[in-house]
Amino acid sequence: MSEKVRVHEIAKELGITSKDVLEKANKMGIDVKSAQSVVTMEQAEGLANYIMNGEPSEEQAKPEKKTKAKTEDKKESTPKKEEPKAKIDNSTTSEAKEEPAKAAKSEEVKEEKPSENKTAEITPRIKPVVKKSGLKIVKKKKQPKEEVFEAPKKQEAVVSSYGKMSEEALKELAQKKKNKEKTAPVSKKDQGTKLDIFGGSMADVSIDMDDQVVLLDLNATERQAIEPEEPRKPKQPKPIGRNANKKQAPRTRKVSRDKRKKYTKEKPSEEVVTHVEIPEDIRVYEFAEKLKRPMSDIIKVLFDLGMMMTKNDFLGADEIEILSEEFGVEVTIIDPKDEFNYVEEAESQEEEGEERPPIITIMGHVDHGKTSLLDAIRKAKVTEDEAGGITQHIGAYTINQHGREITFIDTPGHAAFSSMRQRGTDITDIIIIVVAADDGVKPQTEEVIKIAKDSGAPIIVALNKMDKETANPDLVKGQMAERGISPVDWGGDIEFVPLSAKTGMGLDDLLENILLTADILELKASPDANAKAAVVESSLEKGRGPVATVIVQNGTLKVGDNVVCGKAHGRVKALINENSKQIKSVPPSHTAVVVGLNEVPAAGEIMMAMKNDKEAKEYAQKRYEYDRHKELSKSTKSTLEDMTSMIAEGRLKSLKVVLKTDVHGSLEAIKSSLSELRNEEVKIDIISSGVGGITENDVELVGNSENCVLLGFNVRPTGSVKALAKQRNVDIRTYSIIYQLLDDMTGMLTGMMAPKFTEENTGQAEVRDVFKSPKGMVAGCVVEDGKLIRGGLVRVIREGVVAFEGELVSLRRFKDDVEEVGNGYECGVIISNYEDVQVGDVIETFKKVEQKVSL
Ligand SMILES: Nc1nc2c(ncn2[C@@H]2O[C@H](COP(=O)(O)OP(=O)(O)OP(=O)(O)O)[C@@H](O)[C@H]2O)c(=O)[nH]1
């Protein structure tokens, strides 16, 4: 019962395409998506019947009534046979008739011939009112032997959807039948080569094709509604799947006792494994190890099922399912992430706490005044120090408004940082969208609206630059309302606060609005809980090592805490607040720079305080192993699955890049922006990247690679590195503004692109005479369209077909060399290396014009 079969195998067996099978399966409500999808034997049987007969199997539904039904139906069926017979005579192709006839000659087949039963089975299908123009059942020979056969367990002949069955298929069926009779244990080889997709009932099928022919006309318009006669078994919980919900409880696949026995008997092993726990991503050899079986056993089973796999290949959900059944083991898929899911564990312990300050993210279009606004609120200038006047990194600060605290995250404005911005919203309680009242909604404002809406956090709109004469708040309100952000004074639910970061007007209003919104949100945290903080920024600092700017979400982060943060861990050596002061602890919703980690954590990672150093280290180690495994898995998978696209990629010219940045956030943002710089011809290949200064190793790496540049963002090469770069002739490019880096790379990629030419035809002339000259064959022509030009290319067209393409050597009018000859004039033309020009040919001159290529 638990045997499964793939869609493509059903298709093969029936001699139709997998697509057709998928279509029918979906019509029957069977959830299959590709040719590799599996269905149960029962589903396969129903499906096969549906495909062949246009309706699901009845036998399946009422097996116990089969014998009785058959006997009763037999009598009724006889008179009905006439009509279909008449029809088939017209529609059956000679091929369709011959094939079954041939098959019927087989000795084995004849032995089993229970023809009348077929009639009995088929009749009820003809009986219903449904007029299937395509499905005709013909009883060619009438057998009065009805009584001779005592309700044997036979069914109708199996025919492919087109009314014929290959000899091979017939043999297979006969063989299956034999096997069944012998009730001998099925050898593994048999299982591999012949998939009995029709299950037990079809294995008993008699294939006397002389008796009846079932033809399926796929154009049939009227079909009976497909109603499975037996409520389908509740779908077994899909045990595995790469993207399956990770939070699900461990899934177990049960395998029937008999099966287990069968395999145990077949392959006696010293230690019989009956249950294994495996991760979702497992390689063939790892699976073999878990099962304590030779790898070759696994590979052979897969091979027999038509899956070519090597020991390092990853097993998919379907393969694991098949293998678990083949080897009679119960498989539990475990989520390896559970092993280090310290966040979820902590969350489950979270309880109602005390009120905490709101965390605010300010977002908006470039130059609409985010930094100025935050500055104005903090009464400190930040804008001036920033390279190029653009906020490069996320900064987080807490301010005090009338005794109540508010924490702000300043997200950068450049489009390249949108991924960081998105991260910002994850920890945000309230989002402030800054729109310059004199500029209105811009592309990034729209992007921000989307992010804000997706995050579900309450929104407040800051209408900035109200001090400007050109400020038009109503225009902004209208534009925002059009995008679903309706102002309260227009009957909507979003507060629009007019303000000026420059003059300070309206700032208090904004802060009061934030606090009001926070009151509604009732933000709580437990200061006594184990600290949980989100990394908003991280970098490698000289003298301090890896540092991370964090916002504490729950608990209190203290100096001396043992923390884990993704695959980084450590003991908090120092906590530095936004005013560069060392502090002892950070309460909920406050920010600090954490010193003491063993490596730079990724921005967006969650930092958790652990009971002790050992625990923190263990979590980090597990996470490290998981990441490594994932990375490996990705590389193998991509080689296997994306083979074709990779072959295509081989044609791409790539510019190799080694990238170093000062902080993690920039690294990610630049990497993602660089990966977008590509087209069907060129792309960027980041061969190495990291946070920190440019090292000699980086230079060596670039020096040893072809077509490679070394990019530094907010980092600069020092003496020895610079000297080595010069010696190795390595191109180091450093930047402090991201779009300059991207512009440069775009320029370099464009330079690598092959030039594109367009053709410009100048004119055509007809050859009226041909004569020899010392320079070559001269074609005496008359220009009939446009003009012939010198210095261009030339084409000889004979009877409409291009006979030659080359260069024009000489263009003369009488004895003079000329640059061009206009319409209606005669001229002499010599074509380089072409003597075959003939009277009646048409000569065409043209130019190739180079086009500007762009990425
Ligand atoms: N007149 C006026 N100018 C403002 C106001 N707010 C900001 N500006 C100016 O607008 C320009 C951009 O301000 P920023 O605060 O750097 O804008 P931003 O949105 O943080 O820009 P990025 O960091 O590039 O994303 C600066 O020249 C500010 O002086 C305001 O309320 N009134």
Image (cartoon, grey):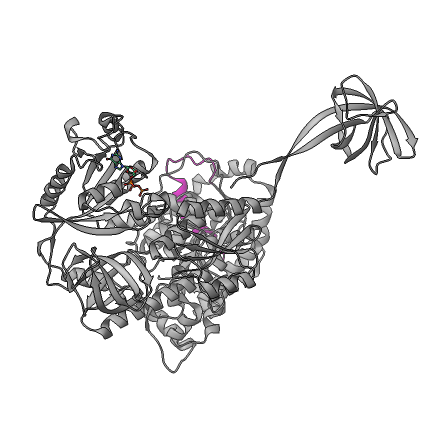
- Which residue is at the front of the view, 544 or 224? 544
Left or right, 499 with respect to 172, comes to left
Residue positioned most to the top:
824
Verify whether residue 564 appears in magenta. Answer: no
For residue 372, which quarter of the picture?
Answer: top left
Image height check: is 583 above or below 290? above
Q: Is residue 533 above or below residue 850?
A: below
Residue 334 visible: no
Residue found 45% across the figure and 66% down from its top: 181
Q: Quadrant of ligand 1?
A: top left
Question: On the rendered structure, is 478 left or right of 80?
Answer: left
Judge whether residue 386 can be spotted in this image: yes
Is 624 rendered above or below residue 119? below
- Seen from the viewer's position, the closer of residues 823 and 396 is 396
Image quarter (top left, top right, bottom left or bottom right) of the N terminus: bottom left
- Residue 131 within the segment the image draws in magenta: yes
Q: Position of residue 674 (x, y in %)?
A: 44, 49
Camera-side residue of 562 and 484: 562
Image quarter of residue 590: bottom left
Which image quadrant is residue 340 in? Answer: bottom left
Query: What's the residue at 36%, 49% (across, down)?
Result: 31
Say whether residue 74 is left or right of residue 246: right
| Relative image position of residue 474 (x, y in whole percent) | 22, 25
Q: Is residue 165 above or below residue 474?
A: below
Q: Nearer the viewer, residue 232 or 714?
A: 714
Tell me which segment is drawn in magenta. Answer: 113-135
